[in-house]
Amino acid sequence: MAFLDSCKAPPYVSSMIRSFRDKALERFFGTGDGRRLSVQNTRRIANILRALDDASRPEDMNLPGFRFRALTGREKGRYAGNASGNWRITFGWTKGDATDVNLEDCH
């Protein structure tokens, strides 16, 4: 059983994460293998991904400790939450699904 599988909703509920930009993050989401992630705190990453997968709109990510925010400028239309230090998880939102989920260094 994959690491995050035990935390997902029953199979009749569709996933809200449609796509990933970061292959290591996608692998972690699917298998729990965080060896290729650029951050050490994989538990926090798992919590953020779980919340994102359960979200029905971007504002559902406005949870304590996530420091959720809408991005501006050239990133307008995307959202971010703090992952660890300078690292953040960013995502877009299309037709009720998170898209292009990414783990990026914001500095």
Image (tube, helix red, strand yellow):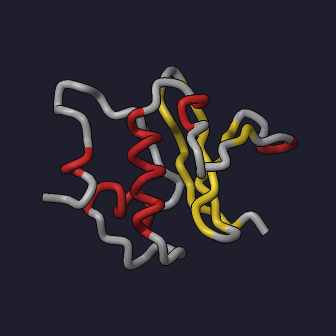
Determine whether, in the image, residue 45 is placed left or right of residue 68: left
Q: Residue at x 67, y 41 (%)?
A: 79
Across and down, in percent, residue 61 comes to 56, 37
> Which part of the image, by quadrant, shows the N terminus?
bottom left
The one nearer the camera, 91 or 88, is: 88
Q: Quadrant of residue 29?
A: bottom left
Q: Quadrant of residue 57?
A: top right
Q: Residue at x 70, y 69 (%)?
A: 86
Q: Is residue 7 above or below residue 96?
A: below
* Residue extending furthest toward the right: 73
Across and down, in percent, residue 47 comes to 42, 53
Q: Residue at x 26, y 42 (%)?
A: 8
Q: Is residue 28 above or below residue 50?
A: below
The one nearer the camera, 36 or 7, is: 7
* Residue extending furthest toward the left: 1
Across and down, in percent, residue 6 comes to 19, 50
> Which part of the image, by quadrant, shows the C terminus?
bottom right
* Residue extending furthest toward the front: 64
Q: Is residue 83 above or below residue 75?
A: below
Across and down, in percent, residue 26 comes to 40, 57
